[in-house]
Image (tube, helix red, strand yellow):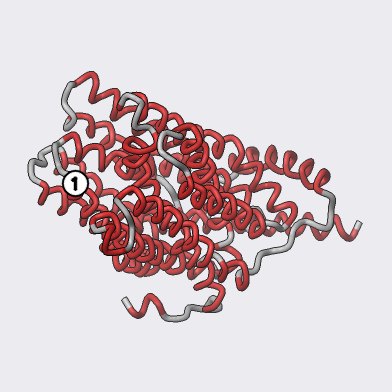
Amino acid sequence: MQDSLRPTSSPRRRVLAWAFYDWANSAFATVVIAGFFPVFFAQFWAKDLPAGASTQWLGYTSSAASLILVLSAPLLGALADQLGAKKRFLLGFTLLGVLATAALYWLGAGHWQAALALYLAGLLGFFGGNVFNDALITDVAAPADYERVSSLAYALGYLGGGLLFALNVLMVLSPASFGFADEGEAVRAAFLGVALWWALFSVPLALYVPESRGRDKRTLAAAAGGAFRELAATFREIRRLPNTFLFLLAYWFYIDGVDTIIFMAVKYGLDLGFASSSLMVALLITQFVGFPAALVFGRLGTRFGPKPAILAAIGVYVLVVLAATQMTRVEHFYALAASIGLVQGGIQALSRSLFASLIPAGETGELFGFYNMVGKFAAVLGPFLVGTTAALAGDIRLSLLPVLLLFLLGALLLRRVDVAAGRRDAAALSRLGTTSATDGLMR
């Protein structure tokens, strides 16, 4: 594992600065999204609402954030490419997320509408920042280092999010030991801590991560016009990259399975009758197993290629889903949490690095906008299928079967992706774009 942390051919400082953004914003994903917000929203801010209504509004808010990102990410990515402003866009979304998360600390009981509004802003800050952070990988690492660098970032994310979450769980379990009056005050302090953590560990990226220049010096209006034209051209260009398109289709299916497990695992455990404290322990297991496992997957991706490693991760997910349908004890839940930790960071990291190698240089903002659009749009389908299956079958265990189908479809499509041909096509388009730009300057 230490070998995974050694300097690569990419300059060490900018790689670590970029990777530490995952350490920074994973605190929001772990502590807020997966950990405390859903439970605290129902028990504190929306305590006067029926349980079904609080769940409904929480679901609507998450779907709204995904929909906003789906509609805006490609255009914002194209605009960032035009202006050479990926880092500025990232820091802007980070500021939005930090302020919204910090504001939850001062929000009193019963203010469920304001809590949802702040949660929506936090989700937009988190998801929007990821669009531009993903795109910056081509500015900090050489193509040969994509797998290792992307996996390092996810590993740091799991470690950072897990450490802060562990501290926050201790705060909630024993609030008096930390000087808090009760569990509610400890949870609100945890939200404030996430905001401070997110802001502090974003500083290295702001200071040390460079980015490629924009097209030229132009006004915002001209850049917006260029972004719309470039967005239309990107739709046409993706059709000229059949393997990139096929990868995005495969990614849409299998990442939907991954996200569905992330979003539904705690609810599934609760429906099986496991205590909420046991589910928090399971989340911690996933985080701390995920740290070394993501580094190992980076090495596997470098040695064998990202595609075989992703297919292996999908295989593990298939086994996890099948095992979950037979789960009866909380110890089984812990074992499955550890299994997910082995592959969750790896499949996310290697998907990002594989996509980066399949797209032309100079268009990473808009194309990673598409990549994140696909990921967020996929997150709508899986939970819907799980909920519908549970309602029709009347058995929560059977509700996981559609997730199995998503993984299998993703694996079948990914097997058809010719990575070498896709990289050649992307390189050819990069050379064509460079030649066209040079010809335009000479005329």
In the picture, the quarter occupied by the N terminus is: bottom left
Does residue 78 sit above or below 17 in this rendering? above
Residue at 15 percent of width and 54 percent of height: 335
Question: Is residue 309 something one can see in this rendering?
Answer: no
The extreme left residue here reads: 328
> Which residue lies most toward the front here?
181
- What secondary structure is marked by label 1? helix
Please give the name of the residue rendered at 81% of the width and 60% of the height, measured from the top-left corner.
438
Q: Quadrant of residue 68?
A: top right
List x then y, in percent, for residue 277: 20, 49
Q: Position of residue 418 (x, y in %)?
A: 44, 51
Estimate the x, y position of residue 80 in percent, counting from the top left: 68, 52
Q: Nearer the viewer, residue 124 or 367?
A: 124
Q: Is residue 127 visible?
A: yes
Camera-side residue of 257 and 396: 396
The residue type indicated by label 1 comes to Leu
Residue 103 vs residue 147, the one in the foreground:
103
Q: Residues within 10 Å of mark 1 (few under 14, many from 20)?
A: few
| 417 up-or-down from 409: above or below | below
Query: Foreground: 236 or 92?
Result: 92
**Identity of the residue drawn at 83% across and 57% down:** 217
Q: Is residue 168 above or below residue 38?
A: below
Q: On the rendered structure, is 437 left or right of 104?
A: right
Q: Residue at x 87, y 59 (%)?
A: 441
Along the horizontal axis of the image, is 136 left or right of 440?
Answer: left
Question: Which corner quadrant holds the C terminus?
Answer: bottom right
Q: Is residue 329 left or right of residue 191?
A: left
Residue 86 in which image quadrant: bottom right
User: Which residue is labeled 1 in the image?
Assistant: 319
Which residue is situated farthest in the right direction here?
443
- Residue 284: percent from the left, percent from the top? 26, 58
